Amino acid sequence: MATRLANLVTAAEQPARLARFWSDLLGWQATADEVTVQPPSEDGCELNLVFAPTSRPKTTKNRLHLDLSSTSDEHQRATVARAVSLGARPIDVGQRNVPWIVLADPEDNEFCVLEPREEYADSAALAAIVIDAQDPARLARFWSPLTAWPITADEPAFTTLRNPSGRGPTLEFLRANTPKHGKNRLHLDLAPHDDHAAETRRLQAAGAHPIDSDQTAFTDPEDNEFRLLTPR
């Protein structure tokens, strides 16, 4: 394993405020910098939520979003009510009659509170990180070796990666025909286990495209931005 998932980064006009929202909603801990939210060890989640400052307003539906889990219908309703009390609001993205609830956080980032599902029984608060994809299987094949998460489901509508531990959120690529417009507000960070130069070569060999001179920012085969962190 040469890299690992480290962070899910969200561009935010008020990073500390959005970090507090997600910390309170998930029951995760905000760190001293007030813009990083860490899961408790018992959740089995191995990545942090990081909120980075931006002056760029949100104008289109995000291509990445979070799915929250629930253990019962009552738990789902309680999670939705808690989210709304913290500043979220129900939204319509064309979902029609579905068993999950679609909400927007205080900066209009979409997320879903799922109905109880057996496949997320060991996921704790965060069920999935969902990425819109025109070719889910192709994108999953790109990300699987970078995360060392195997493909656990491959259907026409979606392809899923899962941490080998069986805990924490899945990484799910969901078929969507809408093209990408502009820079994503959410992106993944990878942390290298080996030296940075070797990892940049491996990423490019896998199909990533560097988009900065330092070779820390890349796009995947469907132009979703991600970063390769540098050693501290």
Image (spheres, rainbow, N blue to C red):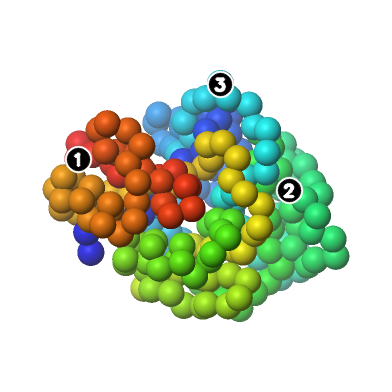
Question: What is the quadrant of the N terminus in the image?
Answer: bottom left
Picture coordinates of residue 145, whole percent (x, y): 32, 66
User: Which numbered tag is attached to residue 55?
Assistant: 3
Please determine whether, in this image, residue 43 is positioned above or below residue 9: below
Q: CA distance from mark 2 to mark 1?
A: 36 Å
Tag 1, which secondary structure?
loop
Q: Which residue lies at the image location 56% right of the left edge and 59% below the top edge?
A: 133
Q: CA distance from mark 3 to mark 1?
A: 28 Å
Decide which of tag 2 and tag 1 comes sooner along the chain.
Answer: 2
For residue 35, side relative to residue 57 (left or right): left
Q: Which residue lies at the image location 52% right of the left edge and 25% below the top edge?
A: 54
Question: What is the quadrant of the C terminus in the image?
Answer: top left
Quadrant in the picture for residue 149: bottom left
How many neighbours does mark 2 have within 10 angstroms: few (below 14), some (14-19), or many (20 or more)?
many
* Amino acid, disc 1: Pro
Tag 2, which secondary structure?
strand
Q: CA distance from mark 2 to mark 3?
A: 23 Å
User: Which numbered tag is attached to residue 103?
Assistant: 2
For residue 55, side relative to residue 99 (left or right): left
In this rendering, does residue 100 appear at all? yes
In this rendering, does residue 30 appear at all? no
Q: Which residue lies at the image location 15% right of the left edge and 51% below the top edge?
A: 198
Q: Nearer the viewer, residue 228 or 181?
A: 181
Q: Which residue is mark 1?
A: 231
Q: Residue furthest right?
A: 97
* Amino acid, disc 3: Ser
Picture coordinates of residue 58, whole percent (x, y): 64, 32
Q: Nearer the viewer, mark 2 or mark 3?
A: 3
Decide which of tag 2 and tag 3 comes sooner along the chain.
Answer: 3
Q: Which residue lies at the image location 66% right of the left edge and 58% below the top edge?
A: 177
* Amino acid, disc 2: Leu
Q: Nearer the viewer, mark 3 or mark 1?
A: 3
